[in-house]
Amino acid sequence: MSDTLIKTKQVKSKLTKDEVIDFLTGNPDFLNRNPELYDILTPPKEKTQRGVVDFQHYMVRRLKEDRDDIIQSAREMIETTRSNTHNLSRVHTAVLALLEAGNFEDFIHTITMDTAGILGVDIVTLVIENDSGSIPHINLTGIRIAAPGVVAAKMGKNHVLLETGVSGSEALYGAGAAMVKSQALLRLNIGKGIPSSLIAFGSRDPDMFLPDHATDLVTFLGGVIERCFRAWLDAPQ
């Protein structure tokens, strides 16, 4: 009796051809929802009669789609690598220019004037907080004097801030504010007794600086600028 029950259960566990056909008829999108089945199904060698689905056609189409996805991913990876390499080269060039400055005025000029062309941005400014509206012995193009608290209000707790779709701030860019559509703001920590400051990199290209971009290169550049400042001003860290 027990053997009979076991055999009966084994027979009942197998689907018949008609049951499979009925299921697929009631679920016409089953293979679309389970595309992995294309890898294990044996397709017909050819389409022998009207109404017979050519699985081989769908399998070939899937392979082509997978190939296209791989090619597109490879192209995006290559483009990203090229862009990263180009940006790295630009930052290296900017660092060398900063290190070659012969005096403090040359150093400031390099930051606010030369690095814009080197990095491919439209405007670079050095923003320094000062309640008197000026800095003694310093009157150089590219430096913006801001009221105390401006840097903290703009940066919050961020050391680097990338923004797109912005309207340039006159407090940061002066007369060049109107052209700024994206920006990278870098807080500077020069040393004790030095007013809060930041460097603003502005671009008319809204996609130049996006919030999801990596910030390691601009952070590195900022670190170099901070150390150069300390050396020129003989300021303690």
Image (cartoon, grey):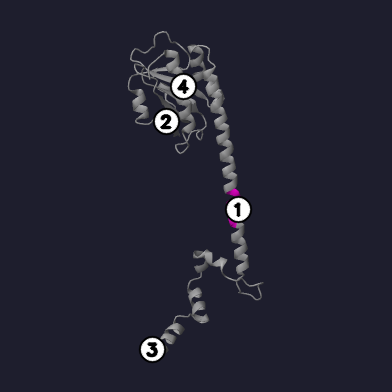
Q: Quadrant of residue 55?
A: bottom right
Closer to the chain start, of discs 1 and 2, is 1
Gap in angstroms between the C-alphas marked 1 and 4: 45 Å
Kind of residue at disc 3:
Ser
Q: Residues within 10 Å of mark 1 (few under 14, many from 20)?
A: few
Q: Secondary structure at mark 1?
A: helix
Q: Earlier in the sequence, mark 3 or mark 2?
A: 3
Compared across the picture, whether 72 is left or right of 159 comes to right
Q: Nearer the viewer, mark 1 or mark 4?
A: 4
Q: Establish if 139 lies above or below 80.
A: above
Mark 3 to mark 2 CA distance (whole Å): 75 Å
Residue, disc 3: 2
What's the magenta bit mostly, secondary-structure-wise?
helix
Category of crowding for the residue at label 4, using alpha-carbon neighbours closer than 10 angstroms: few (below 14), some (14–19), many (at least 20): many
In 3D space, how far apart are the residues under numbered discs 2 and 4 (Cα atoms)? 14 Å
What residue is shown at x 53% (from left), y 15% (from top)?
A: 101
Q: Which residue is the extreme one toward the bottom?
A: 1
Mark 1 to mark 3 CA distance (whole Å):
56 Å
Which residue is label 2 attached to?
160
Q: Which mark is residue 68?
A: 1
| Residue 225: mark | 4
The quadrant in which residue 163 appears is: top left
Res. 228 visible in picture: yes
